[in-house]
Image (cartoon, rainbow, N blue to C red):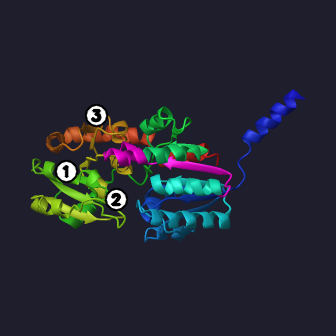
Amino acid sequence: MARARRQAGLNRLAAPPSPQKILQITNVDFSLRHFLLPLMRGARARGHEVIGVAAEGPLLEVARAEGFRVLALPLARSLSPLAQWRAFRALRALLREERPDLVHGHMPISGFLARLAARLEGVPRVAYTCHGFLFNQPAPWPRRALAFVVEFIGGRLTDVFLTVSTEEAADARRLSIARRAQAVGNGRDPARFRPDPLARARLRAALGVPERRVVVCVVSRLVRHKGHPELLAAMRAVPEAELWVVGERLPSDHGADLEPAFAAAGLGARLRRLGYREDVPAILAAADIFALPSHFEGLPMSVIEAMLCGLPVVATAIRGPREQVVDSETGFLVPPRSVAPLAAALRRLATDASLRHRMGEAGRARAIALYDEARVVARTLDALGL
């Protein structure tokens, strides 16, 4: 009889999970398009019904075109109590209507509201992925304290607590936010992000950039904490290279406008602002060096993309990038908010093609081993019990 019970238990473990209705909830269309969509695809491939939820925006059409239901709610990247109350009420109404089996929240505010609403509406399972703790971000202490309290309370509402960064999973366990926090990482497709000589030649020809000219590239939102002012200042000391800036400021972004910094950069024709692009793999393949001198990160996708494309990476020695970049092996780590070390690292790479090649190859091998999108998605779905 005991043997039969053990076999029945093994059979249950081996059986695939039954189809579930999953709500993936984030703040804005940019997050859903660039962070959640691969996970949504993976869950659907395993036979589950997946619904995306975010504030309305043009990038939601990418997921809708793939056949996903994507619902727009008044979610806001704002500390306005009224705006967040409206979002919370809308979330509760949606959960009452959809009756999902699992709610998976993302980003600090939308993730907290999603978990609280799910608990109040009796959702069977509640999950959260931390893409970066705000209390680790440079900010006045009252704001950091509030962020910690929100995360601490949110941890009590969560069945499955995931992070993209191993350091922040350790933070969650150490600070008793979530004692079983698990790092699942971030990932991109190595078949899409890869060295591509044809794309490199085509894009450089289109932009009128000679093959031998060294190109430094940054891909990020145009916000202060991504370190654009430091990068612009550093590039003045790297006359051998030009800078490609890819990205835009989202309507929901806060903080100082970076236009004065770009206007005062003094780089002339060595600065190219390419805006938001869907052909980022080709842009990275056409570049020579990737830079991301951020002040705060989770586990930046752009660094993974650059590594997969065979670029050496110059990043700041902060949570996230310092577990991605091996200093002096796949790139260089420099102090945040500091121009001189950033300029020195960029110039060393700009003047040494063999070093760029060696570090780029090492970075691609590391990214394939650690940040392959298919493995990251599978690991996340397994952690979610899907």
Name which residue lies at 61% across and 46% down: 384
Residue 327, compared with residue 61, is above or below; it is: above
Badge number at residue 280? 2
Mark 3 is on which residue type? Answer: Asp
Between residue 367 and residue 315, name the one nearer to us.
315
Disc 3 packing (10 Å; few <14; some 14–19; many ≥20): some
Name which residue lies at 35% across and 67% down: 251
- Disc 1: which residue: 231
Inter-mark Cα distance, 2 to 3? 25 Å
Residue 239 horizontal side relative to residue 161, left or right: left
Name which residue lies at 54% across and 62% down: 88
Inter-mark Cα distance, 3 to 1? 18 Å
Q: What element carries label 3?
A: loop
- Disc 3: which residue: 327
Name which residue lies at 18% across and 49% down: 230
In x, y percent, where is residue 70? Answer: 55, 67
In x, y percent, where is residue 116? Answer: 58, 54
In x, y percent, where is residue 352? Answer: 16, 40
Q: Nearer the viewer, mark 3 or mark 1?
A: 1
Q: Which of marks 2 and 3 is in front?
A: 3
Q: What element carries label 2?
A: helix
